[in-house]
Amino acid sequence: MSAATATLRRTAFGALAFGIGTTEVEHVLATQCLLQNKPKTCEVRFEAAAPKGVTAKDLILALIAQIGVGGGTGYVLEYTGEAIRALSMEGRMTLCNMSIEGGARAGMIAPDETTFEYLKGRPHAPQGSDWDAAVERWKQLATDPGATYDKTITVDVTKIEPMVTYGTNPGQGVGVTQALPDPAALSDANQKAGLEKALAYMGLEAGKSLLGKPIDVVFIGSCTNSRISDLRDAAGVLKGRKVNPKVRVMVVPGSEKIKAQAEAEGLPEIFKAAGAEWREAGCSMCIAMNGDQLSPGQYSVSTSNRNFEGRQGKGGRTFLASPITAAASAIEGAVADPRKYLA
Amino acid sequence: MEPITKFSGKVMPLPVRDVDTDQIIPARFLKTIDKQGLGINLFNDWRYLASGEPNPEFVLNKPESQGATVLLAGDNFGCGSSREHAPWALMGWGFRAVLSTSFADIFKGNCLKNGLLPIVIDEATEKELFAAAQSGPIELTVDLESQTITLPSGRTVEFPIDTFSKNCLLAGVDQLGYIQNQMPTIEAYEKHVGDRVLTT
């Protein structure tokens, strides 16, 4: 547990982890325990393999667009299916990190060979026969075949394309080539008002796609998407290309360790040659608590997890997307489809 | 923590769905280490104009909202960041209860631990209250003991709350206070179980 919802990424390893408030932290420090009620369970099946250009970030944004920001309230999710098994541990962390944006307490993935391979040899991992015993134990953690859940959701992965949010919560997302929904088409007055308010804040028109929408800032970072594979993916798109001179592009590694690794791999040189800033590790523009902020009215494409009003600076407007979509948008100076930049 | 038993209060309507904790209090005000004094930043970016002046259009600034103790909000109130500053800011302004058709899990837990009562209402009650609030200021009565609210129409509606949280709120004791009151029992237990083996 941790006093930040960012802690959810640990659920990618099959561990239960969730965000708690300050008072609960106090309770843990004082008593080493915490009263919890058993959450309801929900299986989220991502059947089929993810199409080209569809990353872990796109899978989770598509899920939240499908169920809404309150769709998982009261549940711990378990992500299953071919698209999940195919994800790297880092992709799984991205996915699990954003379970809370769908309202879920947590979202877990059963450990498998990918998990064990990732953990083997890492600091604090068991060694020798302890390792073998640990792996045997971890193999028991997976849900039994045929187990029942309180609820099951199926996501049709074949229909997902690179996702971008257009609104002021992470559930307001669409495929990058898709038209934005029209409030006039909604019958529920509350939902209609919500969508109208979001589009007005974002300065967007219903019925059009976001492709080509000019942007001011690109932020590649945050606990959602600042691991080494995210940086490699963004660098892959930016290598040998230039970012649009009108756009400020910030690349912020998730930790000092990731920063050092990226430097050893020569990634900062790629970012800098493209015209992006290579920054110190930290939260940066995800939460806008320091100087990294949008000005009122500015647009960003951001790989972080939240697009709430003012999240990246008062009056700032955030499009959430994957690292490759962010990198492609940096090049075009506008919301872009990353698929054309992929080998 | 101040006990909650029964009170009548003015209702402030905020007919917005999915209000996230970044709206309740933006991150830049979280640098404080005190739970007090956050009321002035409640709904900060909706509440103040760029000039720093109060936005007269925002419901919190309207004369009829002054002194309100009950917030009536749209569905899924308190989503997003786990920041406990959200209930602190709501309480700092003067709210004692929040009504919504649903709350985000962590926010709800944070409310219960701080003496702010999250009351889940059904859609019919939500509609009735928002409609009533449109034609002028309304009041309602909250009775935690009987787990009921009494609407301006006179209708009484029950609401759910877990027994432990309810007892803590009625007594004005937070969870840590509750545990600390059990110290003799805990110490006796610890003696009884002896040295425990910690497993990883």
Image: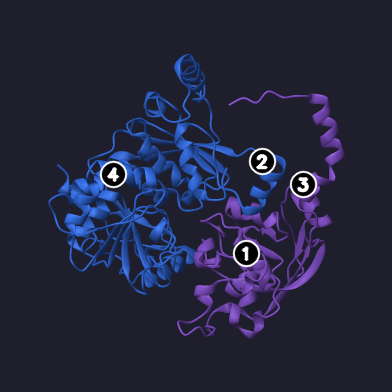
Chain A: colour as depicted = blue
Horizontal arrangement in the rendering, residue A180 relative to residue A145 (left or right): left
Horizontal arrangement in the rendering, residue A301 relative to residue A16 (left or right): left
Report which quarter residue A326 is drawn in. Answer: bottom left
Q: CA distance from mark 3 to mark 1?
A: 26 Å
Please name the residue that numbered disc 1 is placed on.
B126
Q: Amino acid at mark 3?
A: Phe
Residues behind callouts 2 and 4 on a single chain: yes
Q: CA distance from mark 1 to mark 2?
A: 29 Å
Looking at the image, is mark 3 or mark 1 earlier in the sequence? 1
Please name the residue that numbered disc 4 is placed on.
A262
The answer to whether the residues at label 3 and label 2 have Cβ atoms under 8 Å apart is: no
Whole-percent x, y for residue A213 in the image: 24, 65
Camera-side residue of B67 and B192 = B192
Q: Amino acid at mark 1?
A: Glu
Q: CA distance from mark 2 to mark 4?
A: 39 Å
Above or below for B50 versus A340: below
